[in-house]
Amino acid sequence: MSRVAESTIGRSREVELLLAALDGGAHVVLEGPPGTGKSTLLRTVARSRDVPFHFVEGNAELTPARLVGHFDPARVLSDGYVQEIFVDGPLAAALRDGGLLYVEELNRVPEETLNVLITVMSEAELHVPRLGRIDAAAGFRLVAAMNPFDAVGTARISAAVYDRTCRIAMGYQTAGDEVQIVSARAPEVPPVWRAGVVELTRRTRSHPDVRVGSSVRGAIDLVRVGTSLAVARGCPVDDWQVGLDAAFVSLSGRIRLSESAGRTPEDIVRQLYEDVFGPRPADSDDPARDGDSPGEAVARRQGRAAVR
Ligand SMILES: Nc1ncnc2c1ncn2[C@@H]1O[C@H](COP(=O)(O)OP(=O)(O)O)[C@@H](O)[C@H]1O
Ligand SMILES: [Mg+2]
């Protein structure tokens, strides 16, 4: 288990709980905002258990036929509805081989597809018209990920699914864990700057005008984009303007503002960026600030906040 816990940074408790739930025969819902490591956790656990793993993206196009499987239409004409021409979908495959079926974004799955999953969890078998019964081999488990902030149909699935699954809540990682995750997923950069990037990303989650902030994915992208931009501009990655531009690109689309905010995402990213990295240094090129008096420039430089 320790090997598993190591590859999912800071999630040893969740790894332990998920393994216990699966070993105990339970199906599991992992519930948390995007980027909290749900897929990473499940992938590592699946690898450690050495069981077949079937991955399904939950969305409006996930019909029962896509999930379960279908008869090859071309061969139905010549051969009829015979077992041999049934093409297993991920659910049929997971049932037969006693594998893990991982459904991402369960709350986006259409009602009729959800009903198939609910039935399988209740009965441990599946009835397919014209094919017959597929029994769940020992080991079959459903693990579903859900995003509580996703308004699309979250309420509708609640009772029946929750009653048949165990639930592991996944909150945002700690700052220290996020720094480690960014180190693992993005190029090497000065540690102080990396810590600032993580701090900036985390602050998008508690800004009063922001409904949903950025996950650690925003911090990973910021470091990646900043690194490339610094090369293109021939300056260090912790250059003030490079960081700000990389922050706009990496964070502005990832934050959801509250209805009443009356501000742009760029405005909020810039405010938070200045809170963390300080105001624009006086020696930095900024056409908009050319009118500053020397006194103002010095005041700005002295007001530069330390990166926590
Ligand atoms: N605990 C973790 N250990 C290592 N990498 C992580 C961890 N949590 C998140 N990540 C990284 O952050 C990104 C988002 O994680 P992911 O598992 O896809 O989140 P989710 O499925 O909850 O949206 C991925 O790039 C992943 O590699
Ligand atoms: Mg995921």
Image (cartoon, helix red, strand yellow):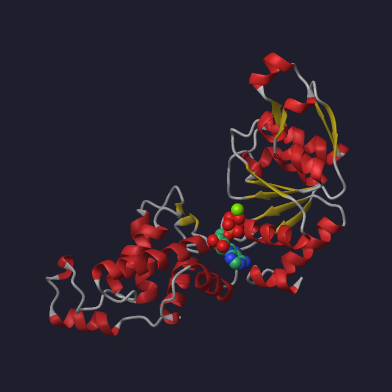
Using the rendered image of the protein, determine whether residue 124 is visible from the camera's viewpoint.
yes
Using the rendered image of the protein, determine whether residue 33 is visible from the camera's viewpoint.
no
Q: Is residue 253 left or right of residue 301?
A: right
Residue 191 place in picture, x, y as percent: 45, 81
- In this view, the residue farthest toward the top is 77
Q: Quadrant of residue 227?
A: bottom left
Q: Residue at x 58, y 50 (%)?
A: 149
From the viewer's perspective, is residue 75 above or below residue 263?
Answer: above
From the viewer's perspective, is residue 301 above or below residue 149?
Answer: below
- In this view, the residue farthest toward the front is 78
Q: Nearer the viewer, residue 185 or 193?
A: 185
Q: Nearer the viewer, residue 234 or 240?
A: 234
From the viewer's perspective, is residue 9 above or below residue 126?
Answer: below
Q: Quadrant of residue 228?
A: bottom left
Q: Residue at x 63, y 60 (%)?
A: 40
Q: Residue at x 78, y 48 (%)?
A: 99
Q: Is residue 190 left or right of residue 287?
A: right
Residue 250 place in picture, x, y as percent: 40, 59
